[in-house]
Structure formats: C-alpha cells, structure tokens
Image (cartoon, rainbow, N blue to C red):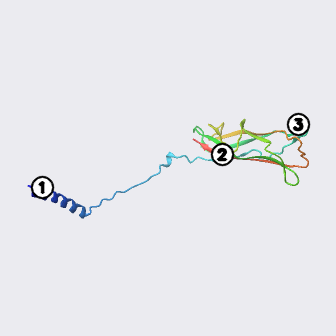
Amino acid sequence: MKFKTMSISLLILMSNLSYSADGVEKNIFLYAHINNEEFYSYSVTKFGFKQPALDIEYNQSEEKFISKSTKIFIKTDIPVGFSAGFEITPTVLESSCTDVDGSIDVEGFATYYMGGQVLFLEKPIVFDSFNNSSSQFLSDTREFSIEFAPTPGLDVWKSRCKGSATLYVALSF
C-alpha cells in the first residue's frame, strides 16, 4: 500500500513537471490611454496692470507718499458658463528709499492691496469666480492700490525711492 501512494505522488509530480517544461506562453497586451477630455487645457491669455508704472507724489506736510491705484486685468480662454476661479500670489512686494551713498533710509513703508484685500508675500488670494465675462470668455478686472505709511525725517529731495510688486496668477477649477 505504501508503494501505490508513492507511485501516485510521483506521477502527479512528473505530470506537473512535464507541463512546465513545455513552456506554454501567452501574450498579454497592455495599453495606456489618456482621456484628454477629462483634463482642462484652458489658460490665462493676458494678465497685467492697466498702468505698469506709477508715479507717486510725496505730501511734505504729512511726511508720506500719496496713495495710488490702478487696475489689474486677467483674460482667459475659458468659455463663459464654465465654473472657474483664480488665485493671485505676490512674489515681490517692496518699497525703499536710499540716500546718495546707497544706504537705506527707509524700507517696507508701502502696503499693497488687490480688490480691497491686503497682499502678503507668497500668500495667495483666492477668487472663486471671475467678475466679468466678455461675449465668449471669462475675464476679471480688480482694483490694485498702494497705501503708504508716514516716513518722518525722510528728505525726498536727496533720496532715491522705489517700489515694486510682482504677482503670479493661477487658474482654479
């Protein structure tokens, strides 16, 4: 009885070995496809300031620069009726006055605003929707303003004053 059991076991093993030795192969073809309809290819077509350079006046009696504003505009190729928004991220917000030697007299005296919201460096401001739409595409126009803190003791006649703001825009869906 022991012999039969061994014989059957050996036969099963041999049978399995012979099938694996035959090397039956099957091909499985793999495909990858990107469904472009599921992604958005919309973009900002124009972004900028109505006045890219501002001349700022100084009020001697208040010892500060006079606030100034302009408009910022965004145009897209996003069709009207599509739900989209955008965010603005300031990467540069500077203001400084230097003397003839290049030493800084005063800096950081300007506060920048967009749409009434204070801008902070590297902190995005999110707008959930566009406030204008042309006949075909979403667009937006917002107030951009600069307010100045007093600069007591600053001799504006002897100082070179400058400021800059750099903003980045990104769409959100």
Of badges 1 and 2, nearer the viewer stands 1
Residue 111 in picture, x, y percent from top left: 77, 40
* Label 1: which secondary element: helix
Q: CA distance from mark 1 to mark 2?
A: 79 Å
Task: Identify the residue at horizontal 56%, vertical 48% (top origin).
Answer: 41
Q: Quadrant of residue 155?
A: top right
Residue 119 in picture, x, y percent from top left: 71, 40
Left or right of 81, for residue 28? left
Q: Is residue 3 above or below residue 169?
A: below
The front one of 35 and 59 is 59
Task: Identify the residue at horizontal 36%, vertical 57% (top origin).
Answer: 29
Q: Circle 3: is it few (<14), some (14-19), or many (20+) Cα within 10 Å? A: few
The earlier-in-sequence mark between 2 and 3 is: 3
Q: Amino acid at mark 2?
A: Val
Left or right of 82, for residue 66? right
Return the mark for residue 65. Answer: none
The earlier-in-sequence mark between 1 and 3 is: 1
Q: Circle 2: is it few (<14), some (14-19), or many (20+) Cα within 10 Å? A: some
* Label 2: which secondary element: strand
Kindly give the residue lying farthest to the front in the view shown. 2
The front one of 45 and 145 is 145
Kindly give the residue lying farthest to the left in the view shown. 1
Q: Quadrant of residue 27?
A: bottom left
| Viewport quadrant of the N terminus | bottom left
Task: Identify the residue at horizontal 88%, vertical 44% (top origin).
Answer: 154
Q: CA distance from mark 2 to mark 3?
A: 35 Å
Return the mark for residue 5. Answer: 1
Count all numbered tags in the image, as a single digit.
3
Q: Amino acid at mark 3?
A: Glu
Residue underneath mark 2: 169
Q: Amino acid at mark 1?
A: Thr
* Label 3: which secondary element: loop
